[in-house]
Amino acid sequence: MLTLRQKEILRILFQSAQTVSIRDLALAIQVSNRTIRYDLKDLSYALKPLNLNISVVPSKGVSIEDSSNPAWRQALDQNVEFGSQVRSMTLMLRLLIYPKISIKAMAEKFQVSRQTISRDINDLIISGLLDDEFVNRSTHGIALHFDEKLRRDTYCKLIQKTDFLHLSLTETENHFIEINSKVSRWIEHVETSYSAEFEVMSKKYLRTVANYLTIRMVEKSVHGHEFAGFVNSEMFGLFWDEDGSKRIERAMMSSRLIRGSLPVDTPPDFVEELIDKLIETLRLPIQPTDEAYQSLRLHLLAATHRSKHNQQVDNPLKDDVRLSYSILYEAIFAVLKEFEEKHTISFSENEVAFIVMHIGAIFQSQSYLHSNITVAVVCQHGAATSNLLHSRLKLLMPNQNLLGPYSVNEFQTQSISNTFDLIISTIGLEVGNVVVVNPLLSGKDIEMIERRLWNLLYQKQCDLLIKNFTVSHQQPIVMQQLIKQKHIQLSDRFDDWQKAIEFAAKPLLDDGVIQQRYITKMIWAVESLGPYMVILPKIAFVHAGNEDGVIRNGISCLRLAQPLSFGTQKATEVQVIFVIASKAKEDMGLLKLVRIIENMDNYDRLINADDIEAILALEG
């Protein structure tokens, strides 16, 4: 038997005509990438008896094999496995929908005893989701003595949790087919009327709210009025009372849009001011006429509306975003913090992560298109082989500046007057940034080139952000204000980057700043996400989430005499490792460090430091 989430994953894969990335699955279902991977393993095991297979290809995505096999329909029609959590959520949902529910009927549905259902109700009370004084038990069943407003408040709060949202949508789709159909047609009409398109999870949320409020009007046997907000809903047979209309309007205004826009109650200059501040502070390379600008504007319109009305939104990639775009996250948070204080508004970490994703995409496209990476091609074979190598590299790197092909003598002459970011050669050269390849480029050669190119592009992206971000320089920052002397270590070399992280973090662990699980999570982050923490060349700023074992704020530093290969995915050279532990997101330890080290003199002193005092004296 499958869980509700596993059935949803299977449904998405079955309906998709192409490979779906794990990240897209995570976004569609609003869980983490790691949760999707676990579910895929369980799914593969559950599908074996039906001789069905799911293909998972690294760096490409997930798909089902032999989609024409009728056994896939059998898999989709499997009964859902009801664990205690699903039972409790279903009980809560039905109590909020119906005037009364039967213990006997619920026991038969879940194939458990009546005593188990009674225990589930008690668990809801113990967890705080239900108050015992509002629960009425009788021989006829269980009912809630909620007034209508409290009932709706409770429901709208619960569906902000992804699992409850999916459960509620499934329940209303299966048991209120006509209402669900009307609501779906109405939402499509809204999109058509405004040339807009809701993001998948936003549409599900809106459908769920509209379904529930329509069902409640039917259960109360009262007539509402036509929803006079965006479009005429009477033609679809949908009516809500005044409270319901306001809730639906809030849900719609808080929805994220893929395209188009809806009438908003947020003053235009409110969001425009925030965008202008982001552009000014981060030096964002966008104009109001750009598609990226409009996409960011649409998101911020919904985000500010959600924040004003205290509506939460889940971002399953929140932790990944904060780890992968750490410098950008802190820079954007600094801008938002100032904006929040001015306008008495608060953005959750989920909202901040979504904004980082939008702006990160802008920076990434700009750093790629305008990277100006210069690549020298050196080939000691004949003209035909050299030209073939150059042609294949041009196909592999169409946006980069390829020079050559050179012979070794020509390259030595050229290298005197030219600076090359990367050298691709068929023979070994006594330079540090060379990749030695077979002239016909094997698969391993291509992988090495892509890895080195990715590292260069990522560092250029970080360089672009650091140069563009206007940090306040009202007060100078000295390294000794950020790091205690006993938290700095000098070492000759490490051959194992995991051991290097453990060694770099040991002073914080011994001092009670972090727990052991924080070190484990940092290593996991580098293994899973690649060396995104190498923001400046040869310097890694390693960290994890503030809930992953941080006791208090602290920073440690390990400076190596010899660089080591850092990371398993897209490995890069690292000579300095900073371990950053931030209990509060307002700490901005990373930004302060970067502000000091971005100065070229400070950077050179740090890389070549032979005593701790020299590191403590760095000032920015």
Image (spheres, helix red, strand yellow):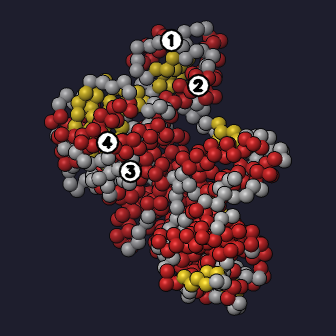
Residue 548's mark? 3
Q: Is residue 183 above or below residue 259?
A: below
Q: Residues within 10 Å of mark 4 (few under 14, many from 20)?
A: many
Q: Nearer the viewer, residue 525 or 514?
A: 514
- Residue annotated with mark 1: 427
What x and y, as percent, mark residue 281? 38, 56
Q: Could you tell which of marks 1 and 2 lies nearer the N-terminus? A: 1
* Residue 441 figure quarter: top right
Q: Nearer the viewer, residue 20 or 382?
A: 20
Secondary structure state at the residue bearing disc 3: loop
How many marks overall?
4
Q: Could you tell which of marks 3 and 1 lies nearer the N-terminus? A: 1
**Image position of 612 (left or right of 454):** left
Residue 446's mark? 2
* Residue 202 figure quarter: bottom right
Secondary structure state at the residue bearing disc 1: loop
Do we see residue 254 in this rendering?
no
Contact between marks 1 and 4 (CB within 8 A): the answer is: no
**Image position of 158 (left or right of 281):** right
Residue type at mark 1 is Ile
Residue type at mark 3 is Asp
What x and y, as percent, mark residue 463? 40, 41
* Residue 346 figure quarter: bottom left
Instruction: Give the quarter of the figure containing the C terminus.
Output: top left
Q: Could you tell which of marks 4 and 3 lies nearer the N-terminus? A: 3
**Image position of 157 (left or right of 45):** left
- Residue annotated with mark 4: 579
Q: CA distance from mark 3 to mark 1?
A: 46 Å
Query: Which residue is at a point 36% across and 53% down the rendered structure image?
Result: 546
Report the mark closest to the observer, 1 or 4: 4
